[in-house]
Image (cartoon, rainbow, N blue to C red):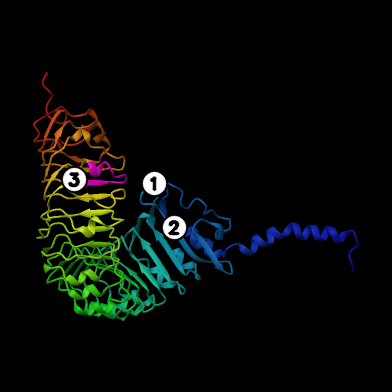
C-alpha cells in the first residue's frame, strides 16, 4: 500500500535524520578491536599526560587517538607515542596480550613511551597481517625469541632503545621481506648473525649501541639496496672488509665509530659517492687518510676523531660540509684547512689536538652565523676569539682549552643559545661577566682573571674558577676587604 502523499516528506526527513547515525554505526570498530585496545589501556599503570585519554568504552575506537581503521571498520594500525623532551609524556605498564584480538592489525608503533616494560610480546605471533613493528625507546627486556623468524610478514622491525640482552637469533634470516631492521640501543651480544645476509631487501640496518663482537661481516656488501649501515658503539674488531665496497652505489650512512677496528682506512671508501655521513671515530685506524677522499664531494658529516691517523690530510672538495671532527689523532695541520674555512653551511667543527698553530684573528670563515659547536682545544692558537664568537647567533658550545688565547673575558658576548664554554688554561684576563649564569657548563680555570665571581655563577663548581690570579667569592674563598 502506498503511503499517503503527505507521509512521503516525513519519511524522507526521518531517513535523512538517521543518516549520521547510520554512518556512525558503519564506521564504528569491531567489538574485538575495542576489547583488545581497552585491554591494552588497562595494562597501562600511568599515563600522566593523557596519551590514551580518548580511549573510552562505548565510543568509536576508530576515532581514538593513534588508532587507524582502513579495512571494513577493523583496526589496521596503532600509533602511540610519547615525547622524550616532555617529562610527563610517557606510559608505564606492560603490553597486554589482548592486542592479539586485533586480527587486521598491520602496524604497531609504540614509540618513546619510556616505561613500557616486559619481555618480547608473544602476542605478535598471533597477528597474521602484521607488517610494521616499531617498539622504540621503552624498557622491554630479556632475550629476543628464537622463533622471531616466524614473523615472516614483517617489512620493518625496530626494537631500538630497549633493554634486550643475549644474541640476535639466527632465525632472523627468515624475515626476508624486511626493508628496515633496527635493534640499536640495547645490550645485545655475540656476533652479527650470518643470516642477515639473506635479507636482500634491506635499505637500513641499525645495530649500534650494543655489545656485539667479532668482525664486520663480509656479506654486508651483498645487500645492494642498503642506504644506512649503523654498527657504532659495539665491540667489533678487525678491518673493514673489502666486500663493503659493493655498497658504494647506494650507501649514504656508514657509521662504524666506537669499536676496536684496526688497519688503514681503505681507499675504496672514496667510491662511496652518495655518502652523507662517515663515522670511523674512536677506533684504532692508523696511517694516512687516502688522497682519494677528495672524491667524496657530497659528504656532509665526517668523523675520524680518536684514531692514530697521521699527516698529510688530503684536500677535500666538498660542496658544503656540515660537521667535521678530526680531533685527537696525530695530525699536525698547522692551519684550519681552507676547504673548511670556505664551507658555506658548516655547523660543527671539532679540531682538538690537531697541531694547529695560528692566530685566531687570521681565521676568517666564510660563514660564522650557523655554527653551533666549535672545539679547538689542545692546540697552539693565540690571539682572541672575541671577534669570531661575537658574530655567531646559534652557538651552543665553544671549547678552546689548552691554547694561548689572550683576551678580555668581559668583551665576550655570550649569545642566549650558548650552553657550554671552556677557555681554561689560556691567558684570559679581566672579570667573569654576569652573563655566564645562562650557561650549563663553564670552565675558565688557570687563566689571569680577577675580581668577584658573579652571584649567579655560584652554581658552578670551584674547579671552574681555580688557578686564576685573583678571583674570589663563592664557590671560591671570600673576597678580601
Whether residue 95 is visible here, answered yes or no, is: no
Is residue 259 placed above or below 452 in the rendered structure? below
User: x and y percent of residue 245 in the render?
Assistant: 24, 78
Is residue 386 placed above or below 330 in the rendered structure? above
Check disc 1: other Cα within 10 Å, few if <14, some if 14-19, many if 20+: some
Q: CA distance from mark 3 to mark 2?
A: 52 Å
Single out the residue that lies furthest toward the top. 481
Label 1 residue SS: loop
Is residue 397 placed above or below 328 in the rendered structure? above
Q: In the rendered image, which residue does mark 1 sit on?
A: 88
- Write the residue at 21% across / 42% down: 421
User: x and y percent of residue 5 in the render?
Assistant: 91, 61
Question: Is 329 one of the magenta-colored residues?
Answer: no
Q: In the rendered image, which residue does mark 2 sit on?
A: 80
Label 1 close to label 3 by CB (< 8 Å) = no
Quadrant where the image shows the C terminus:
top left
- Write the residue at 78% across / 58% down: 14
Q: In the rendered image, which residue does mark 3 sit on?
A: 361
Nearer to the camera, 409 or 362: 362
- Write the residue at 16% across / 29% down: 474
Q: Quadrant of residue 353?
A: bottom left
- Write the residue at 10% across / 55% down: 355
Question: In the image, which residues are magenta?
Answer: 387-398
Q: Which label's residue is closer to the chain start, 3 or 2? A: 2
Q: CA distance from mark 1 to mark 2?
A: 14 Å
Label 3 residue SS: helix
Q: Nearer the viewer, mark 3 or mark 2?
A: 3
Is residue 75 placed above or below 435 in the rendered structure? below
Quadrant where the image shows the N terminus:
bottom right
Amino acid at each position: 500500500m502506498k503511503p499517503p502523499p503527505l507521509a512521503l516528506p516525513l519519511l524522507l526527513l526521518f531517513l535523512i535524520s538517521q543518516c549520521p547515525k547510520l554512518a556512525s554505526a558503519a564506521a564504528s570498530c569491531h567489538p574485538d578491536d575495542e576489547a583488545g585496545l581497552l585491554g591494552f589501556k588497562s595494562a597501562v599503570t600511568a599515563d600522566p599526560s593523557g596519551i590514551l585519554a580518548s580511549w573510552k568504552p562505548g565510543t568509536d575506537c576508530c576515532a581514538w587517538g593513534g588508532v587507524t581503521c582502513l579495512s571494513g571498520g577493523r583496526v589496521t594500525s596503532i600509533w602511540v607515542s610519547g615525547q622524550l623532551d616532555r617529562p610527563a609524556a610517557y606510559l608505564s605498564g606492560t603490553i597486554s596480550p589482548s592486542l592479539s584480538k586485533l586480527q587486521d592489525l598491520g602496524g604497531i608503533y609504540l614509540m618513546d613511551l619510556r616505561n613500557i616494560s616486559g619481555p618480547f610480546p608473544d602476542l605478535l605471533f598471533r597477528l597474521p597481517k602484521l607488517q610494521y613493528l616499531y617498539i622504540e625507546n621503552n624498557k622491554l627486556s630479556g632475550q629476543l625469541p628464537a622463533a622471531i623468524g616466524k614473523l615472516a610478514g614483517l617489512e620493518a622491525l625496530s626494537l631500538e632503545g630497549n633493554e634486550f640482552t643475549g644474541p640476535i637469533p639466527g632465525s632472523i634470516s627468515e624475515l626476508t621481506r624486511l626493508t628496515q631492521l633496527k635493534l640499536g640501543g640495547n645490550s645485545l651480544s655475540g656476533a652479527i648473525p650470518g643470516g642477515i645476509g639473506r635479507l636482500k631487501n634491506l635499505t637500513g640496518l641499525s645495530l649500534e649501541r650494543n655489545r656485539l663482537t667479532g668482525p664486520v661481516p663480509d656479506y654486508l656488501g651483498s645487500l645492494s639496496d642498503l642506504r644506512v649501515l649503523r654498527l657504532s658503539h659495539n665491540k667489533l674488531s678487525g678491518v673493514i672488509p673489502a666486500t663493503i665496497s659493493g655498497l658504494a652505489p647506494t650507501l649514504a650512512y656508514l657509521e662504524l665509530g666506537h669499536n676496536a677496528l684496526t688497519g688503514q682506512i681503505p681507499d675504496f671508501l672514496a667510491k662511496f659517492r652518495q655518502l652523507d655521513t662517515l663515522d670511523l671515530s674512536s677506533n684504532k685506524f692508523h696511517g694516512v687518510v687516502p688522497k682519494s677522499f677528495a672524491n667524496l664531494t657530497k659528504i656532509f658529516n665526517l668523523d675520524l676523531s680518536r684514531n692514530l691517523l697521521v699527516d698529510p690530510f688530503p684536500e677535500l672538495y666538498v660542496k658544503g660540509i656540515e660537521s667535521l671532527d678530526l680531533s685527537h689523532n696525530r695530525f699536525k695541520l698547522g692551519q684550519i684547512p681552507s676547504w673548511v674555512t670556505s664551507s658555506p653551511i658548516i655547523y660543527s667543527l671539532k679540531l682538538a689536538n690537531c697541531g694547529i698553530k695560528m692566530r685566531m684573528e687570521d681565521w676568517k670563515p666564510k660563514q660564522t652565523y650557523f655554527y653551533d659547536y666549535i672545539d679547538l682545544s689542545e692546540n697552539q692558537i693565540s690571539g682572541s676569539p672575541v671577534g669570531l664568537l661575537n658574530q655567531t647567533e646559534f652557538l651552543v658550545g665553544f671549547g678552546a682549552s689548552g691554547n694561548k688565547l689572550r683576551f678580555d673575558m668581559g668583551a665576550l658576548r655570550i649569545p642566549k643559545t650558548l650552553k657550554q664554554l671552556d677557555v681554561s688554561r689560556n691567558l684570559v684576563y679581566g672579570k667573569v661577566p654576569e652573563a655566564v649564569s645562562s650557561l650549563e657548563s663553564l670552565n675558565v680555570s688557570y687563566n689571569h682573571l680577577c675580581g668577584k665571581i658573579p652571584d649567579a655563577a655560584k652554581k658552578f663548581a670551584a674547579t671552574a674558577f681555580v688557578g686564576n690570579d685573583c678571583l674570589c667569592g663563592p664557590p671560591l674563598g671570600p673576597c678580601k676587604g
